[in-house]
Structure formats: structure tokens, C-alpha cells
Image: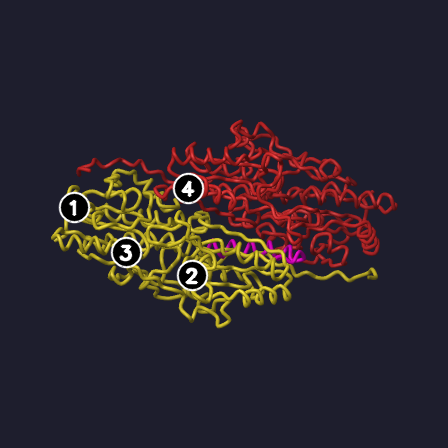
Chain colours: A yellow, B red
Amino acid sequence: MALKGTMVIGQSGGPTAVVNASLAGAVLEAKRHPEIEAIYGSLGGILGIIHEDMIDLGRERLEVIEGLRSTPSAILGSCRYKLSNEDYERILAVFRAHDIRYFFYVGGNDSMDTTHRLGQLAADRKYRLVVMGIPKTVDNDLAHTDHCPGYGSAARFTALSVRDAGRDSEALSNMGRIKIMEIMGRNAGWLTAASALARENPEDAPHLIYVPERPLNTDRFLEDVQRTYERRGHAVVAVCEGVKDENGNALAESRLPIDVDAFGHGQAGGVADVLCRLVKDRLDLSARFDKAGTIQRVFMATASPVDVQEAALVGEMAVHHAVKGVSDRMVTLERVADEPYRCTTGLVELAKVANLERPLPDEFLSPSGNDVTEAFIRYAAPLLGGPLPPYARLAKHPVARRVAG
Amino acid sequence: MALKGTMVIGQSGGPTAVVNASLAGAVLEAKRHPEIEAIYGSLGGILGIIHEDMIDLGRERLEVIEGLRSTPSAILGSCRYKLSNEDYERILAVFRAHDIRYFFYVGGNDSMDTTHRLGQLAADRKYRLVVMGIPKTVDNDLAHTDHCPGYGSAARFTALSVRDAGRDSEALSNMGRIKIMEIMGRNAGWLTAASALARENPEDAPHLIYVPERPLNTDRFLEDVQRTYERRGHAVVAVCEGVKDENGNALAESRLPIDVDAFGHGQAGGVADVLCRLVKDRLDLSARFDKAGTIQRVFMATASPVDVQEAALVGEMAVHHAVKGVSDRMVTLERVADEPYRCTTGLVELAKVANLERPLPDEFLSPSGNDVTEAFIRYAAPLLGGPLPPYARLAKHPVARRVAG
């Protein structure tokens, strides 16, 4: 017999364009199950439970819940907070007081760890509780899932913006500029790799791609840039904010106390600026950078329709399985086919994804260390939810010269 | 009787999302006039004429010309190049050799100056030549036109990205971060001001807006940020890359030889980084910046339909007037009404726009020096080509507390 009681759902970590779609999927599914007697939302991630700062999502108008599918960022508020043992006890006390029997957490690997521990504590204390993880991260670095909701939309924005900024750089190629585009990703280059989807032809931007999975040797980087510049008159470089040098140290990371988060991670970012200075100093070439920053992860206007739909689906399936008694699992996405793209969902034990990071596999990275492979393109393309709109290409019939010199 | 001969068109300065729409408008109109015997495109701005690097646009397929309306950046290539007296003579020689009688230049105020001088030289040398300027700049700083093609699309991207990044910052407000968004604009804050269109409610991002028209006093800036932070738990700041201090010096500008262009302008940009450091050092608050850079000016996926249509129109009208014998003019946009928005075109002497910059007028800037006025909103809103898509807002019915502490 299904467990009766209240459910609470929270959103964690960095917001995405589609994390509210997951919320919509979970809430709408929960409304179909009478055993879920109330649907609470925790404000500010797990902190909302600790502070008893919760709202009654069941009373929200249906149009508002539906509207979450096209509303970016985390509408419940999010956090990056590492729980103490005391916090876990407090959460359990809040759950008991409100008869909360279902806990859903939308987040990345840190959040899956939190969810798993909470389930374990409840089991230890003989408190019947179902805990389920709903995947979310533009970094696409969760293990045991084909991909992560949030990634497809961020990848689409990355491809579109690198394509357009690449055309901008090409138009000014007589100025011989090097353009460096800084893409999000602390330890995994999935999003940076997606910049390759900007290319319609092999000579299109990005001309060079650097990800944290391959150490960045600055001499080799400068050679790559110089060679591209000589061939094309300009160069567009996509670089992951988290690239490391050969000693495994981040090329640019702030470890100022103000920049270190609760999990001990420093602030990535600034690498494009570092590389621009290097290009100016060592190659005497003009260099500028674009760093779309958080815009990349939440930009809604170009969200991938596939991503929106899958984000809602994983939310829905988490509730679907939970009311059947499944617990301590994260919903996964399982690809059935690339073309036409088909995807279904599965389940994985939370302990298997908790605190694990999935880097880009070798088969997705070219041996040159500065590009991706066709296998990656096949993997990532369907997640963008359709091809990029086509751009005009002129035939450029030349006019014969008539003047000397 | 209309002047018979070849026309040449070039694109100049920083690319935009719609500068190819102007090209399409001009080419399609030219095809309607038999006195225009051939339609050439100059590759790389004016440099294409100097180097006789021209293409026959009349031979391009019609679908390709139509496709230019949805293709960003400058498809003919652009330049930032200051012509020497020798260059002007050379251009006239090329014009004579190819019987070029119509010159159209799509660009900003430097380009209008170039176009004007070319017309004057031709007149001095008794060479019959019609020269027309087609306005283009995301900076929106051309005089004697209500607004500039390119601005509406860049403004729409700015509003969308500040809105979404603002929601991102709000979701993580328990982390108390200051987010600084660097917006393009060397001397004029039109694009930065457009960030205000991100707001649905007064408390929405951006909370503070700084433009070059008002000197930025760092102490006042820090007070503004601190006050906003205390009220909201976070702050989203839109700052123009070209903001100046009280002595009129750019807060962040590189004057390295490699960064100074042909017109003697240094490289603006870097101000968000400077302000982030200031916030960290002096307020001990976490601060990060987004700098979409060139993405802002060319991002096509969210181009303003009004902007695309008007960009095509000014190209079309330039040719329309030219074949009637009008010369030495730039096509302007003249607003007829705000709501419903209606706009027509006019003409202005090139000499009146050449090398002039139109800053934001006082009536568009709030006395506080850190925001825009309702008058600016009324001015800018129609240029975005429609309201931003609505986002869901939860009613947030609170759940009553049941646990002590």
C-alpha cells in the first residue's frame, strides 16, 4: 500500500533554464496521486526545510504551474549549502512535524549525496520516508545518466552564441583579432565541447576548443592560436573556465576566502582574460574575450524544446516511482536512438551518483587536445532540440580587377 | 534623368544582428531600378574597394539575398580603417574604372564621415557620384535619427539576458552575491539603459544601472551596492563598459598599442572585473560578472522583428532616394507614435551625423545617477519588437510552522 503523507520538493545548486520544468512535472504528477496529501515547496533549497520556510505548491493556480515550463532559474530559490549532522536531525524533525513522507531534490551530485544521506538517516530512525533525486546540471557531469536536464538548453545557447560571435570575428578578420569565449564548467568540458555544434563547415568557429579533461600547455596553446591566425586571419577559441595546467592546477581560479564555497570549491572563471593577456604579450596579437557567464545556464529564449520536455519528464517520473514505493534513486535519462532521437527514463541508486563527476570520455576528444570528435557531435546534437536555423552564404562571384596596383 | 551605372555597397564597423538585413533591403530595391546596371559588394568594408576586392551581388540567388534578413554579422566583411588622402584618390580611380556611380555605406558616425568625404572628393573632381549612408550601430549613438538599426535587437538581448541572469542571482540570494553585468557602449549608455526593460516589477533586476553619461564615483557606487544588498540580499548591476570617473577617464580601458584602433580609440571593457574586485575588497561581498561581449551585438536568435524590418527599410530607402538623385544623405528613422508604434524614414545631411555622438539625454536618466526614467522605457520598449515573454510568478502560500526553533 502506498505511503500516505505530504511531499516536499526543493531545487539546489546553480539554476538552469529548465529546472522549473522539472518542478512543474513533479507537481502535476503529484496532483494525480491522492496518497500525496499536500505538495510543499522548500524555499532556498534544503535551507527552506531547516528554516521551515515552505510554501503550499498544491494551492498554486494550474496556469502558474504550467507556466514554470517556460520560466528560467529556480523559482523556489536555491542554495549551495553543506549540511551538518545537526541539520540532518533538524530536517527529520521538520518532516515528522509536517508528516512529510516524500522528499524530492532537484540538483547535481552534491544534492544527490544530501538526498541519499537524508534517506539513510530516516531509515536509521525508523521514519518511513521516500527520497528521490531529480537530475539537473548544465555541466552534464552526473554519472549513470545519458545526459542531464539543463545541459541541452545551455548547449544550444553556447552553440548559437559561438556561431554568431564567430561570424562577428570573421567579419572583422582583417583586424586580425583573437577571440576567446569562456564557457562554464568547473571540472568537465561538456558545455565547452558543445561550442563545436556552432560549425556548419569545418572552417567555421570555434577553431580551437580547450576542456579541463586535457591539460592546457600554454606554449602549445599559443602555437595553436598562431597557426590558426596564420591560416584564417583570425581565431575563435572556446575555453572552459575550469581548464587546468599540466600539474592539475586551475589556470584561473580565485581562492580568496570570499570566493570559496561551502564545499571548498574556489571560484572558477577568469581564464579567458588570462589567455587574452598571454596572446597579447607573447604573440603581439589583439585579443578579446566574451564571458556570457550565468547567462549561459539560464537563458530561456533559446531553450532546447527536448531539454524542457525531458526536464519535466524526470520530475514526473520521480513522483511516479516514489508513489510506487521506489526510494533512494535518481531518475536517469536513457537514450534509445540518436536519429531520430528517442529517450526514455531509468533509475539509479543515489549512492552511485553522489559526489561523482563524469568527465568527457576520451572518445569525444580529438587526439590533438584542442577539439572534439564526430562521436561527440552525434551524442550532443539531438539534445539541442533541433538544428540551428540556417544562415545565408553568398556565392561571392568576384568582380574582375580593372585598375593597376 | 537618373544616373546610370554600377552601385557598390559596403558594411563598416562592428557587426550587428541586422546589418545584413540592410544589405538585403538595398540589393532588392536596386534590382527594381534598371539605371543601376550592376550591384557590387565591397569585401571588408571600404578596404574591398581600395583592394578591388568586390563581388557581384546581382548574381546571388534571390533566396540567399532574402536569407540575409535572418543572418547576423556583416556578410561582406567589415573594417575599422581610417582612410588616407591617397586612399580616397584610389577609391575614386576604382569607381571610374568600374563606372561606379552609387556608393552605399552601412555604418556608424565614422563611416558617415568617410561617405561624406568621398562624395565631396568626387564633386571636386567632377565625377558624378551618388553617396548615401545607411545607419547601423548597436550603440544607438547616431544623431538626427530616432534610433539606429541594430540597437533594438541588441537591446532585446540585453533585456532578456539581464532578466534571466537576474532571476539566477535572485534564486541564489541566500549566498548574498553581487552580480555585475558588463554591457557594450564606448561613450553612450543606450544599450546599458535597455537592461531596465528586463524589469517586470520595480524590485526586479537590474537594481542599479551605470552609464558613461554620468560619472561613476566609486564610493557612491559601493554605497549603492551595499544598500541594495541590505534590502534584497543580493544585487544585480548593469554597467556600461565605457563608464568614466569624475575626471572623464574610462574606469577600465586598455591603451596598450595592440588595443588602440585606427581612430585612436582604446579598448573599452574590463570595468565589471574592476568593480567586482572593488566590491570584494571594500564590502567583503562575493561578486561575479557576466560580460556577453560581442554576443550582445550579433545574437540573432532573439533579434527584434521591428529592428530587422527597419534595417531592411533603411537599406531600401537609401537606394530609393539615390536613384532619384538624392546624395550626401543618411537615411534616418522618424518615430510617428509610441503606441501603437509607428515609424517612417527621413534624410539627414551626412555632415550633420559625421563624427558626432549622441549621448543619452538627461530626461532619460534618473537624478540618482544609477537608473533610467519612465521616458526612456517608453522610448525603448517598442524597439524590442514586442514584450518579453511572460514568466510564472508563484503566489507562495506559506506553510505554517510546526517546529520550535
Residue range (magenta):
A156-177
> Is residue B157 visible to us here?
no
Amino acid carrying label 2: it is Trp
Q: Farthest residue in the bottom direction?
A: A367
Query: Label 3, on which residue?
Result: A112
Q: Amino acid at mark 4?
A: Asp
Give the Cα separation between the discs numbered 2 and 3: 20 Å
Are discs 1 and 3 both within one chain?
yes
**Mark 1 in CB contact with mark 3 (< 8 angstroms):** no
| Label 3: which secondary element | helix
Residue B164 among magenta residues? no
Q: In terms of depth relative to the viewer, which is nearer, B38 or B149?
A: B149
Residue B247 lies in what quarter of the image? top right
**Residue A22 in picture, x, y percent from top left:** 32, 50
- Mark 2 lies on residue: A190
In this picture, residue A27 sits left or right of residue B110: left
Looking at the magenta stretch, what is its main secondary structure?
helix
Q: Chain of mark 1?
A: A
